[in-house]
Amino acid sequence: MTGARASRTTIALKLGMAVSGFIFLGFVLAHMYGNLKAFAGQDAFNEYAHHLRELGEPMLPHEGALWILRLGLILSLVVHVYCAVVLWRRAARARTTKYVVKKDTGATRASLMMRWGGVTILVFLVWHLLNFTIGKVNPQGGATDDPYLLMVDTFDLWWMTLIYLVAMLALGAHLHHGIWSAAQTLGWTGTAAKRQRAKTFGFVVALIVSIGFSLVPLAVLAGIITK
Amino acid sequence: MNLTLKIWRQPDASSAGAMHTYQLADVSPDMSFLEMLDVLNEQLNEQGEEPIAFDSDCREGICGMCGLMINGDAHGPEVTTTCQLHMRSFKDGETITVEPWRSDAFPVIKDLVVDRSAFDRIIQQGGYISVNTGSAPEAHSVPVPRDDALRAFNVATCIGCGACVAACPNGSASLFMGAKITHLGELPQGQPERDSRVVNMVAQHDHEGFGGCTNIGACTAACPKEIPLDVISQLNKDLRTAIKHGH
């Protein structure tokens, strides 16, 4: 026996990133489903948002289930960011003298963007929560207590839609490499065929998520979704 | 062929180094990359300049001693070792940048020579099986399924050259470790020490200062022995299993 050394290795940190990453994947898929309710109209969208707060009642208090989910997400965020920072610093120390010429043959652009792409998503997350959850800022000065109206007023502005589209591009790239990378870290890709399947799955899910989220802001801007 | 060579020169481990530019004329396209450097060194000798230090041994692509970063690719533009790379892979008049492996775990000893003892120390932590010596046991007494034997043989071709570390943007040695873990883990003789092997080797890897793997895949693209990326999945799986077993 060598004590608890295995859980203090770089691979254990990667496992932390993989598991928390998959929790986020589950969240974004559910979030995307909720957003797409916007196509069913104001009542369906607001009913869904309202029901999230009543989920589990009367067994759980008002917003009880929501807060359990939120705590899980906050914990995942702490784990994901902590592991990323430790691994980023390790990688920086592993090569302090840079190459004069370096090609990254065999690497996808998405795989090389993971860290700065992750920072982009984190900055966007703060912006997004201030916009819709914590701050409920209506950039047009209109209603803030009606989720549907807040959403339409936000994406009616072209620059708001642009910010969200850039964020979804970053999220798509992050998922494109992140999903297959997490599968590899969990040891699920032990053959060439399984690796290819994981990469294809990651690409398809990344496409679904980034397009699925982008549809609503684009539809508002195009006048398909209106007040 | 006429070439412009930009080569890293560093007198010893404690001195600062810099890129130096050399002109080399009449290079045959049939020369290997190391033979081209030999010709350059003869020219430097004649001029009374210190020849460029670089590692090489078998020059047959099987020992893992040579290894240079050539124009940003470990072992140059072909999937092979530096000694098996030929000048026909380059164009007449080309400028070629030659650097040593860059990894803080592989300190530069002189010019293009790096100290790869970190790999030896990782191997000492578990890249072996413990058996009593004596007369060789009957080969058929321990049957090995064909597919397992093939996989073990394929990844046992790793020559420990360090190209995976050199190519990795994180400076990780995961492909090297994965090759050893998979090679021994596929065989019955590797089972008794399977958990302690992965835990000790990864702990030594981290201790040496190599970076963590982010599954970019630059390692496998640079590997002269084409070790596939799935050995890193195997490495991760073995470590996860070891954690489950209480290590």
Image (cartoon, rainbow, N blue to C red):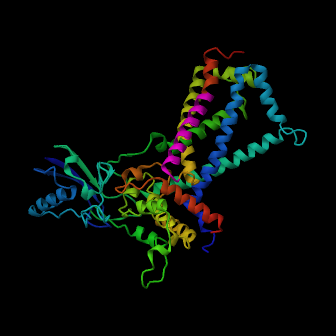
Q: Report whether A213 appears left or right of B48.
A: right
Name the spot of residue A159 as percent of width and height, x first: 57, 23
Can see residue A54?
A: yes
Point out the image quarter for the C terminus of chain B.
bottom right
Looking at the image, is A35 positioned above or below residue B232? above
For the image, the number of numbered tags is 0
Q: Report whether A60 appears left or right of A172.
A: right
Q: Nearer the viewer, residue A192 or A161?
A: A192
At a point 60% along the width and 51% down the height, the residue shown is A17
Q: Quadrant of residue A55?
A: top right
Name the spot of residue B88 as percent of width and height, x first: 19, 47
User: Which span of residues is magenta-colored?
Assistant: A190-213
Extreme residue in the right direction: A58
Can see residue B212?
A: no
At a point 50% along the width and 44% down the height, the residue shown is A196
Q: Quadrant of residue B31?
A: bottom left
Name the spot of residue B118 as percent of width and height, x first: 42, 68
Q: Nearer the viewer, residue B26 or A190?
A: A190
Name the spot of residue A81 as percent of width and height, x first: 61, 49
Q: Main secondary structure of the magenta part?
A: helix
Q: Quadrant of residue B176?
A: bottom left
Extreme residue in the bottom direction: B134
Looking at the image, is B193 positioned above or below residue A26? below
